[in-house]
Amino acid sequence: MKFRTGIGFDVHQFGPDRELWLGGIRVPYELGLVGHSDADVLIHAICDALLGAAHLKDIGYHFPDTDAAYKNIDSKILLKKCGELLAEKGYKISNIDSIICAQAPKMKPYIDQMQACMAEVLGLDEEDVTVKATTTERLGFVGRKEGISAYATVLIYKE
């Protein structure tokens, strides 16, 4: 068996008149994240980790923000496509581990839903998708509630 790991990172700033989407679910909050797509920072970090692990470049290569086809797109569609790109190369996903860095809103009530949603999109068992959350103790842009960042690591394999 051949194993490969990947790491992903993404960041989006908060902005008005946007919904907050994280891990494929809508999180109630007075601000949303600004981006060309729905700006789901968690899914974008996971996509980059998956693509990197399979040596498939990055999310911007496959889904450029200069392409109108991706304007306001649901990031679950991008995640599904990333899973399909891995499958085309013969890879399967072993597990995903991720972290949301946000001072606000609180993530705990939504983590189980995020894990279930992304597992369903990728055809994985829920226990193979982990989402954790932390603050930055009021430090930096996250601590000032200017935006959210996310990190992800993945393990993929080919039999």
Image (cartoon, rainbow, N blue to C red):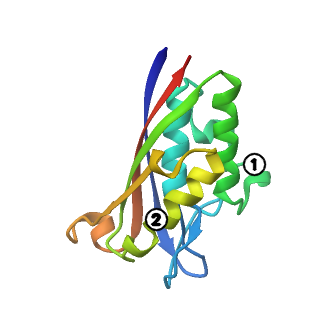
Quadrant in which the C terminus appears: top right
| Number of marks | 2
**In this image, 81 relative to 146: left or right?**
right
**Which residue is more in the foreground, 11 or 80?**
80
Q: Secondary structure at mark 2?
A: helix
Q: What residue does disc 2 label?
A: 112
Q: Which mark is residue 38?
A: none
- Residue at mark 2 to residue at mark 1: CA–CA distance: 32 Å
Residue 55 is situated, as x and y percent measured from the top left of the image, at 55, 23
Q: Residue at x 45, y 23 (%)?
A: 4
Snapshot quadrant of residue 21: bottom right
59 or 22: nearer the eye?
22
Q: Position of residue 9 (x, y in %)?
A: 42, 46
The answer to whether any part of residue 41 appears in the image is no
Secondary structure of residue under mark 1: loop
Q: Position of residue 25 (x, y in %)?
A: 58, 68
Residue 2 shown left or right of residue 139 in the figure: right
Residue drawn at x 68%, y 46% as measured from the top left: 80
Q: Is residue 137 above or below residue 100?
A: below
Three-letter code for the amino acid on which mark 2 is drawn: Asp
Q: To which quarter of the image does residue 143 belong?
A: bottom left
Q: Nearer the viewer, residue 157 or 64?
A: 157
Residue found at the far bottom of this picture: 30
2 and 1 marks in contact (CB < 8 Å): no
Point 56% across, 67% down: residue: 34
What residue would you read off at disc 1? Answer: 67
